[in-house]
Image: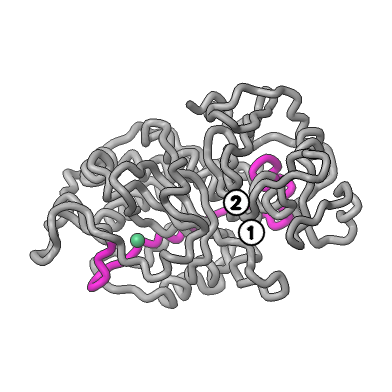
Amino acid sequence: MFPFSRHLSLLFALLIPLCPAQDEAAPSQAAAWAPATMVRDVPYQSVNELRNFYKLDTVARASRKGALAMGNSDISLELGPGPLSMRLGGIPLALAHPLARDTKGNLLLSRSDWVMWLDPILRPTYIQKREVISTVVIDAGHGGRDTGASFDGTSEKQVVLLVAQALKQQLETIGLRVVLTRDSDIFVSDQQRVDATADMQQAVFLSLHVNSADPNACGPEVYRLAPPRDAHHPAPGNGEDARNAALAYAVESALSSVAGRVSAGCCYAHYTLLSSLRIPAVWVELGYATNDREGKLLNSPEYREKLAQAIARGVATFARATNPQTKLTVTQAPKVTKPATPPSASRNETKGASRASDSNRNNRSRSRRRRRN
Ligand SMILES: [Zn+2]
């Protein structure tokens, strides 16, 4: 259940007149933190400090046994029950560092997870890099010889291209310029996808995919670039960590609303593509090919249209949240403009889902089974 999901817009607009926490390294803001507790050389802050900062007065009933739930009229936050588990407004957010406790037993959250997840979502207007978004780069994953997952008589490369084309229409309707990294069934390298964004400003990047795991896994899932493995050598994409968090959450929240309020959550990944992009970027898994119900839904033009509209809503929410001057609104009802039947699968693709062929998939932040807890 997502008791606060209808308040997402309000949540995004939330302003708390306290010290910004987003630039962890800024000396002028270092004094804002209470002294950190070091756990395996990682700085942690107490959850009590976090509660005071965001005025999370209520100890709420947790949706999952063993989780610590807190909130106020706008925010619903759960920590646990797993060590890498957190939920904001019902949306799971994968932690980069496990929850910990100090010597007095107080629950601790890593400073990185506070800064990399919660603050850009709860206080988007404190994100330092703010600009009106005018362009969306839609990257239909795979293509050509790279089919991605095969399922229900179709393949990932075909489904994501159809969603990309529907999304282009949605975004252009609300006045955004759209660039597609591919508009047909051709192979496109990661470098070509990155090159499509060269010198872009006021733009965001969405890479569209279909997920694969065990048959029970379901729901949309959005990845953003993980923190750098070496803090002294961040990837170009880490320059957008704050906006990546806000974009990932906005898109995942919108997608979960069309997926029966099911969400596989927002996760970190060290994908080469996300590492290389210098504009806000997320990797969107639309649903699970390996789940019978979702596989069939992804093959439905009506459902793909709903997904496209949800992503457009997510982009508009992100754009408005990070810059209040933005006026984008997605209001039109879901509509199928043409009877888009996916092209038939190639002859050597088998019925039923196969593993996706994402080359860097093993760089994900955690396993599917762990995410399903
Ligand atoms: Zn893929």
Q: Compare residues 55 and 141 and report the one nearer the observer.
A: 55
Which range of residues does the magenta coloring cover? Answer: 119-148
Which of 311/136 is in front? 311
Residue 245: mark in rendering: 2
Q: Residue drawn at (37%, 36%), measured in percent from left and top?
A: 259
Please report the residue visible at 42 percent of the width from the left and 49 percent of the height from the top. 369
Asked if residue 283 can be seen in this view, the reply is yes
* SS under mark 2: helix
Question: Where residue 142 appears, x then y in whole percent?
Answer: 31, 66
Residue 335 position, x and y percent, is: 28, 36
Q: Amino acid at mark 2?
A: Ala
Q: Which residue is at a point 42% across and 59% down the rendered structure image?
A: 207
Q: How many marks?
A: 2
Taking the spot 67% from the left edge, 72% from the top edge, the residue there is: 230
Q: Is residue 130 above or below residue 301?
A: below
Indicate left or right for 161 with 231 as reference.
left
The residue where tag 1 is placed is 241
Q: Rate crowding at label 2 as few (under 14), some (14 to 19) or many (20 or more) other CA atoms within 10 Å.
A: many
- Ligand 1: quadrant of the figure: bottom left
